[in-house]
Amino acid sequence: MSENLDRFEIAHLARVELFSPKPQETLDFFTRFLGMYVTQREGQSVYLRGYEDPYPWSLKITESDQPGMGHAALRTSSPEALERRARSLKDANVDGTWTDDQFGYGKTYEYQTPDGHNISLLWEAEKYVAPPELQSKILSRPSKKPLQGVPVKRIDHLNLMASDVTAVKKSFERHLGFRTTERVVDGEVEIGAWMSSNILGHEVACMRDMTGPGGRLHHVAFYYGTGQHNVDAAEMFRDYDIQIEAGPDRHGITQGQFLYVFEPGGNRIELFGEPGFLHLDPSAETKTWEMSDIDTGLAIGGAKLPWETYFTYGTPNPLALDRHIEEYAHFGPGAAPAPEAADTDEPAPVGAGAPA
Ligand SMILES: [Fe+2]
Ligand SMILES: [Fe+2]
């Protein structure tokens, strides 16, 4: 990670649209348990924000047949940066279009990653202004912390599943000025990359999609900033029958504290405690994890990230989550072939993938 003149061109992840086949239950999950505020309803969509999200929404839930990610939008650090990033994509013949059709945001450039994820770039964003009853006395806080569930502060990062991690990584590096802070390799193959445009460990991560066609969502993360909140949230999810996948624990990769759950619509959501290592060194080298050290990389405390979900399930997924778990429960690295490969000469997928 040598000189990168485009670093800081992207400021941060502003918003994500999630599809849900159970929109009311998904909405209940984000409002009742994670304390997010509803700011708008429009057609088959509901718009929400955490109490420290700066804009009118960071999460849009849209009813759909399948779970998955509609799009994710990154805000640039200036209007000129937006023009430069769009030009970089155009100069490389990446198809894109300008739009202006999202509540609370202005002119937006939409394109797809090499794996087909919908990414938007924008500068123009309204600042959220709370009604008087929701205004906080803490001046940097756009609205009061709600008295509801274990409330998240804001959206944090995105993790994409890709058939070709390196291609997606290079696209974020080349066109958006991201630098790769950490990565995982399985022999010669890059199977995970954590990418950042600021001092955080990642705003976007990418992991190899071993069971699907790529272009899928692995998870969206929401920020607590406090490890105890992950424990509090885990207790809440146990009591109220929200399916916990793994955690709370801390990754070696990024040093972020994680708790993974499935919202009722089937998308994986990460609750992010302490955000981990901050990348203040502008010339730091990318840290490369080998499979021999992957246990430390995945979870310092020894939490197991389940093969039958964490390394094989993304959204959209051919099977509903409960059926997927049944199908994949007896497969894994060093075990029998995964279901898709069972009738072919293809070897079983190897390598346990990587966390985020
Ligand atoms: Fe994670
Ligand atoms: Fe993550």
Image: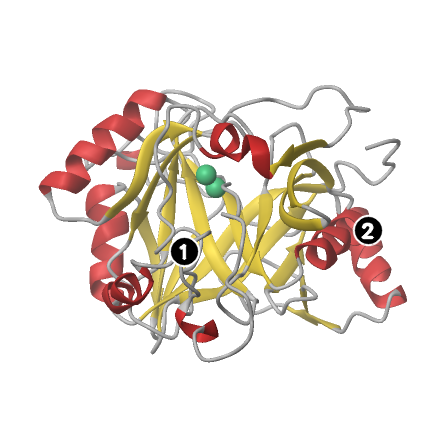
**What scheme was used to colour the molecule?**
secondary structure
- Pick the quarter of the image with the N terminus: top right
Please provide percent x and percent y for residue 224.
Answer: 38, 30
Q: In the orientation shown, which residue stands out farthest toward the left?
A: 239
Residue under label 1: 335
Please provide percent x and percent y for residue 81.
Answer: 79, 47
Residue visible at 35% across and 22% down?
227
User: From this viewpoint, is residue 236 visible?
Assistant: yes
Q: Is residue 22 above or below residue 203?
A: below
Please provide percent x and percent y for residue 305.
Answer: 38, 42
Nearest the viewer among 41 and 176 is 176
Q: Is residue 31 above or below residue 120?
A: above
Residue under label 2: 174
Occupied quadrant, residue 18: bottom left
Disc 1 vs disc 2: Cβ atoms closer than 8 Å? no
User: From this viewpoint, is residue 57 visible?
Assistant: no
What amino acid type is highlighted by mark number 1?
A: Ala
Q: Secondary structure at mark 2?
A: helix
In the image, taking residue 35 as reference, residue 356 lies left or right, namely: right
Residue visible at 60% across and 30% down?
200
Compare marks 1 and 2 and give the one earlier in the sequence.
Answer: 2
Residue visible at 82% across and 24% down?
283
10 Å crowding of disc 1: few (<14), some (14-19), many (20+): few
Nearest the viewer among 301 and 101 is 301
Occupied quadrant, residue 265: bottom left
Report the number of numbered marks.
Answer: 2
In the image, taking residue 9 as reference, residue 237 lies left or right, namely: left
What amino acid type is highlighted by mark number 2?
A: Arg
Please provide percent x and percent y for residue 183.
Answer: 65, 39
Q: Secondary structure at mark 1?
A: loop
Nearest the viewer among 27 and 245 is 245
Occupied quadrant, residue 282: top right
